[in-house]
Image (tube, rainbow, N blue to C red):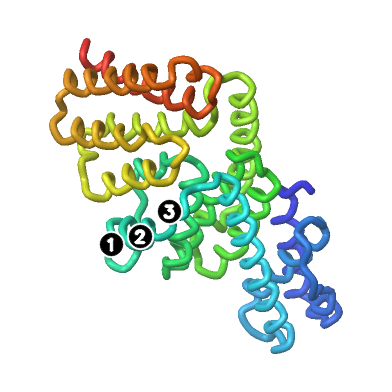
Amino acid sequence: MDYHKIPYKVRKFAQRYESRPSVDDLYTIKRDFNPEKEESFYNAMKHLYLCYSIKCGLPEWYLSLVQYRLKTMEAYFIKYIEDIIAEAKLSENTDAFIDNKLLKHYRDKGSFYLTPVMDNLPLHLRLKLYLHLYREELSPDMHCYLRHRMAALLAKLDKVTAAQQLSVYNWVLAKSVEASHFCDVSALNQTLKAHKVNSNEISHWKVNHEASLLAQEISVYYKTLLEDPFSYTTANMSTLELVSLCYEHYPQLVPLTFTIKSYLRTRNLEAFHARLEEHKRTLIYHHEETIWLDEDLKDQFIIIKELLKIGAKSASA
C-alpha cells in the first residue's frame, strides 16, 4: 500500500460525509481488523479520522464501534512492538530496572522527558524504554511524540510497513489532541520517506560492517555519553547500568561501566585510556584462541577498540 495516499483518501471520505451525511457510509466500518490486509487498515483509518473530524452528530452505535476499533489497533501495535523487543532477548531484570530505578529520573512535573543519551541507547532497548514511557505517560501530546519515535525505531529495525502504519495511525490520533506537528500532512509524508531511508541504511550496514549491529549501537551510546561534558548525572548513570544489565552475553560491559563512570566523574583521559587497554588485554588473555571465532567475544573486543579511539583522540588534542 502507498501510505502517502491514505491522508488524501481519508480526508476525502470525511469531507463527503460532512457535505452529504449518509448512514450507508457509516455502515462500511468493519468490525474485524487485520493490519496485514491493506483494505482493513485503510478502513480503520478512514472511520477513525471521520470520528475525530465530525465532533457531533454521529450515532452512538457508530462511536462505540470506532472506540472498539481504536482499542483493537492500540493493542495490535503494542503487541507487535513487544514481539520485536522479545527478539533481542534482553535480561529478565530489564523491566524491573526500568520501572523501579530508571523512569523516576526522567519525570518532570508529571510528564517524562527524553535526553540525547536516552535517544542513543541500542535500538531494541530504546524501543522497550519508549514503550514503558508510553504506558506510564498521561499526556496525549507526549503519546503522539512517543508513537512517532517508536515508528522511527521500527523503520531502523527494517520493519518499514509497521513503521508506516504506526505513523499514519499517529497522524490520525494527533487530530484529536491538536498536536499540530504530528497532524500535519507534509510532516507525515516526510516521516514516511524517512522510514524507507532509515531501513535501507540499516540493511546496507548489515552487509558492510564487521561487527554486529548491537556492538555498533552500544559503541554509539557510549560515545554519546562520553562526549557530553555534562553527562555525569544520576539519570545518565542509570542508563549506563541498564546497558550492562540487559546484555548478559556481553559480560565485559560490567567492568566497562565502572571504567566509564570513573572517567565521567574525573575526566582523567590518561587513566581512562589505561583502563581500556587493561580491559582489552584481559579479554585477549582469557580468550586468545576463540576471540575471533566467538561473535560475542569479538563484539566486546570491538566495543573496547571503539572506546580506545575516543581516548586516543582526546589525549592527543
In terms of image quadrants, where is residue 112?
bottom left
Q: Is residue 287 above or below residue 89?
A: above
- Residue at disc 3, secondary structure: helix
Residue 315, image x and y in percent? 21, 14
Residue at left 75%, top 59%? 35
Badge 2 vs badge 1, beta-carbon distance below 8 Å: yes
For residue 112, the mark is 2
Whether residue 302 can be seen here: yes
Location of mark 3 (residue):
94
Residue closest to the eye, 165 or 240: 240
Amino acid type of the residue tagged 3 in the rendering: Thr
Amino acid type of the residue tagged 1 in the rendering: Asp
Crowdedness near tag 3: few (<14), some (14–19) or many (≥20) residues, C-alpha within 10 Å: some
CA separation in Å, label 3 and label 1: 22 Å
Residue closest to the eye, 316 or 147: 316
Whether residue 306 can be seen here: no
